[in-house]
Amino acid sequence: MDAIGEAGAGVIVMLMRPLPGSAAAEEIPPPSGGMDLRTYGIGAQILADLGVHAMELLTPSHNNLVGLEGYGLSVVGERSIPGEA
């Protein structure tokens, strides 16, 4: 959050899995190694609805993000999260 504050602009989207034992948790199977496509799509839709189009990712590792064009999004760069190895 500090890096985004220093940049003067940015968006943080946090998506959490439903709590174990809740009705929603029973409907959504646990992901197998990473973010499931439903959650990925929800995050992309939130960014698109906020008017984000071109974005620079703050990330601890490189990811190949596919299908963003369908939401009108594109990754124009990546930067390491400060303090992350």
Image (cartoon, rainbow, N blue to C red):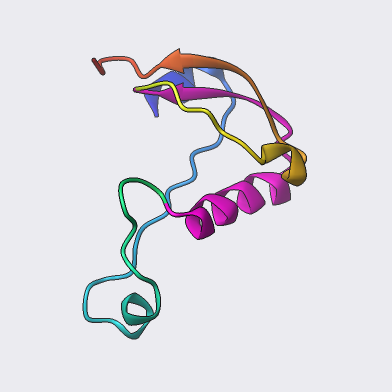
Q: Which residues are magenta?
A: 36-60
Instruction: Classify 59 as above or below 51.
Output: above
Q: Quadrant of residue 36?
A: bottom left
Q: Who's the residue at 67% across and 39% down the image?
A: 68
Camera-side residue: 5 or 81?
Answer: 81
Left or right, residue 30 beside residue 68: left
Residue sticking out furthest to the front: 32
Q: Quadrant of the C terminus?
A: top left
Q: Position of residue 51 (x, y in %)?
A: 74, 42
Q: Position of residue 42 (x, y in %)?
A: 57, 56
Instruction: Say if the magenta span includes residue 58.
Output: yes
Q: Who's the residue at 39% across and 80% down the image?
A: 27
Camera-side residue: 18 or 32?
Answer: 32
Instruction: Classify 2 as above or below 71.
Output: above
Camera-side residue: 84 or 9?
Answer: 84
Instruction: Classify 78 as above or below 49.
Output: above
Camera-side residue: 80 or 50?
Answer: 80
